[in-house]
Image (cartoon, rainbow, N blue to C red):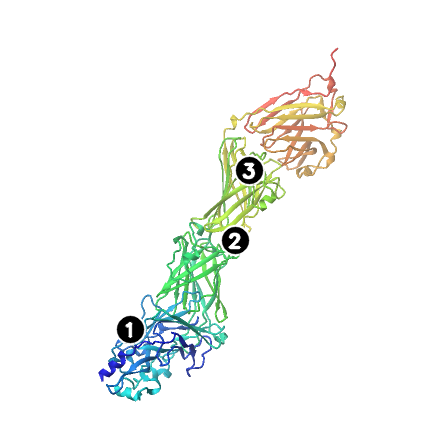
Amino acid sequence: MLAVVVALLGGLGVAATAGAYDITAFTGTVVRPDGTTYADLAGEHPDGGIVDFTFATDGSGEPVGNTKDVRVDIPPGLVPNPEAFTRCTDAQLSAKSCPVGSQIGKQELTVRATIPTLALLLQPTRQTLKLQVPLYNMTIGADQVARFAFNPAMAPASGQANGDKSPIQIIGGVRDTTDAGLFFTISNLPTNPAVVRSKLTFWGTPGLTSHDAERGKSCTNSDNGIVQGAINTAHLLEAGIAGPCSPGGQPLPVKDTPFLTNPTRCAGPLTTRLTTWSYAGEQRNASFDTPYGALDCAGVPFAPTAVFGPGNVGNDAPMPLTVGLRVPQATSSSVRGSAHLDRVAVTLPPGTTISPSAANGLQTCSDAQFGRGTHNPIACPAASKVGTARIATPLLPDPLVGTLYVGDPKPGDRYRLLLVVDGHGVTLRLVGSIQPDPATGQVTAIFDHNPQLPFTAFDLSFDGGPRAIVASPQACGSATGNVRYGGWSGATVDAPAGFQVGGCGGDAFAPTLSAAAGSSKSGAYAPLTVGFGRPDGQQFLSRVRVDLPPGLLAKIKGVPRCGGAQIAQQACPEASRIGTASVQAGPGPAPYPLSGPVYLTDGYRGQAFGMVTMIRAIAGPYDLGTVVVRQSIGIDPNDAHVVVESDPLPQVVEGIPLRLRQLQLGIDRPKFVRNPTSCGTAKVRAALGSIDGTAAQGSSDLAFEGCKSLAFKPKVSLRFTGRKQAKRLQHTGVTAIVTQKEGEAGIRSTSVALPTAVSLAAANAKKLCEYADAQRDACPRDSIIGTAIAETPILEKKLRGPVYFVKGIRTDPKTGRQIKTLPHLFAPLRGQATIYVRAMSAISRNRLVTTFPSLPDAPITKFTLVINGGKHGIIANTRNLCRSGKLRGSARLEGYNGAKRSSRPLIGLPCKKVRKR
């Protein structure tokens, strides 16, 4: 009998000869208990999953070529749950002693074999045998997702075989393609016997009593019970080669744990693909489509939740963040499987934004370095890593773990996340998108078209520390966001999640101001730097107005202005550049620095001049464009001090809240900023405002010295005008001219006394400008008594304007009453700036004295004051000027450096020259 068995099994590997290697039949489907009806409910646990394929045979029934390898790609979303079941070891399988709870199906093989006759002298014949053995769930290695196996030696009488009776391994894996569907392979099929057909049946719920009869059962039968040469199944039984089948009937205590779950997407037929390779290297492909796709997605459960961590964070700071996605999975075959996650949109609480500080040293990972769709090693730069990821799935005993990287920006998708997790031979690579709100910066992170695979926990953990990409809200209290889940079933679920923000306290808005001059020398041209600081946690800076001290001026003359069209095109010429603006953006100890040029512009917002800052916002790998902010430059008409007022500072650029920490303006154009000509301390003052409307004031001192070394040599000339007005009681005109060289100390005050030959014409002093109208530059034209012209080297054009006669009023310091005095002079000089020049009139020792008590500290090389004469003139001659001999006035001038200068200029007269005879 042993010889018969050896002869039989030794001849099972006879090779086929004629014909072409091919797959003649293939079925891949899920079925109901009758074994044929398509199990079509989405998320259903079918009774079984069947993979059945047959190879071509020749006319005698021999397979055409021997199959070496098999790969089956199952539809996305159709998933097993091997982790829920007992596993068999290789040793147990070889010993035919696998635990009964490890059987998850059966394998039915049809093979072509050589069958001996009962009479040993007869030649053996080729026949077809059918084998059935249990299919087991096997232990897995660290690089395996799933492993199943069957042992052909478990078929009756196989112990007497001398052919290849090794267990056959079925190795499960996850496709590298974007659908991350599952597949399994069978490698190195034996050539002895030759496989004609394989029918694998995976039980949907292995513990059901309906499978008890098949549990542990194995058989060996001939094809249809009849073989050539009158040898049939009965003969095989007699030879000890076939049946009876080993008995099944082994129940399991756990009945309803599902092994298979249908896809949860209701679209199109489900396609299973088969690829085989022969030992000759021939490849064949086949596919099977179910009649239609899964049905009734509305009945698929989907109840995800979410959690954000840590539970407590400090305000306005770089923060670690864990986004925890939780999807409960069915553990009973009576409950349909949960919908697989198609899309998740994580919206962080308001105020939780991308941190600009993260740009420090940040790099991005290219698609090639990431290698999605491959098993290639990740080659992303270390500086592109921003966190970790962890996915717990019922398919595996251990979570998949990996890394979060920042991906290269793409058009329309600037902020990309690349996620890779690995484990058990799986590499799952997902691409997400961060979409900040362009107005508020509120972050929504989206992962779309996720694999149709189940998970119970999916944690995205963003690193903390100074370079964290997430910044916490500025406001304290409960911060709540939302996770919107979209299942492949079409269901949408919103799950709130949040954390507590603490650490608020102290000043809500107390920005700092600093100012520094490049030189402390009075009257020198030197750079000027003004800076603002905002500590973490305080309200964001929005409005800035800076008042420079009087005398700290800029030499506009000779500097080309950047025009509006050039600003719009961000194409200001280098010749217009006057300095550099620098900012530090982002929370924490390492805000991100940016800088850009400052240009002088034409007038802006009603002021004579303007500036524009253009900062190219290149933050690490991101080019956010050029941030353009305009400022007006005003000249206070009363003391000529410079007022710079900015447009509201940008708060969000391309979805990134700037969280400005430092703002510095450095004006360093050579020979542009001129120091005051006085000595001592001068204050730079600022009025600041937050985006919440809170106001703050600040000041910073500048110290100047060396003013005593400045020259102060102004010259005064006087002239009476109007030849016809030189007689007594006529009204002469007066022209006064003050000249000074550039670089001298500015004139603080001037007092000019006219000789007694003239006096104030009280009768013509009736059409006076009201004092209040003069204060607001609203004097009527009929109060004009002359003109004034100022020439300065810092402006390109002269300042000129009318001179008004204004009612004199002073306030009694004790009583507060207003007391009338002699009329004043008021001259609003206009041009590239507007300057108010005011003078008081008085009678001292019968002389008309005009005093300019407070002139601006500005370099005036020539100032001309013309008082009109004629019948409406305000100066009356007390005698004939041409017969009064030489007339002199007196002038007293005081400089901003404390120097004084007096003179008695000879007054020019409008008299005819006497011809010499």
Q: Is residue 555 left or right of residue 820?
A: left
Q: Is residue 301 above or below residue 537?
A: below
Image quadrant where residue 135 sits: bottom left
Q: What residue type is disc 2 on?
A: Glu
| SS for dot 1 | loop
Spatial separation of the CA atoms under disc 2 and disc 3: 30 Å
Q: State the mark number for residue 575.
A: 3
In the orientation shown, which residue stands out farthest toward the left? 2
In the orientation shown, which residue stands out farthest toward the front? 18
Q: State the mark number for residue 89.
A: 1
Image quadrant where residue 128 sits: bottom left
Q: Earlier in the sequence, mark 3 or mark 1?
A: 1
Q: Is residue 845 above or below residue 697?
A: above
| SS for dot 3 | helix
Name the residue tied to disc 2: 654
Q: Can see residue 320?
A: no
Q: What residue type is disc 1 on?
A: Thr
User: x and y percent of residue 870 in the render?
Assistant: 76, 27
Q: Is residue 543 above or below residue 371?
A: above
Spatial separation of the CA atoms under disc 2 and disc 1: 57 Å
Q: Earlier in the sequence, mark 2 or mark 3?
A: 3
Q: Around disc 2, counting alpha carbons within 10 Å, would you say few (fewer than 14), some (14 to 19), or many (20 or more)?
A: some
Q: State the mark number for residue 275.
A: none
Q: What residue type is disc 3 on?
A: Ala
Q: Nearer the viewer, residue 581 or 430?
A: 430
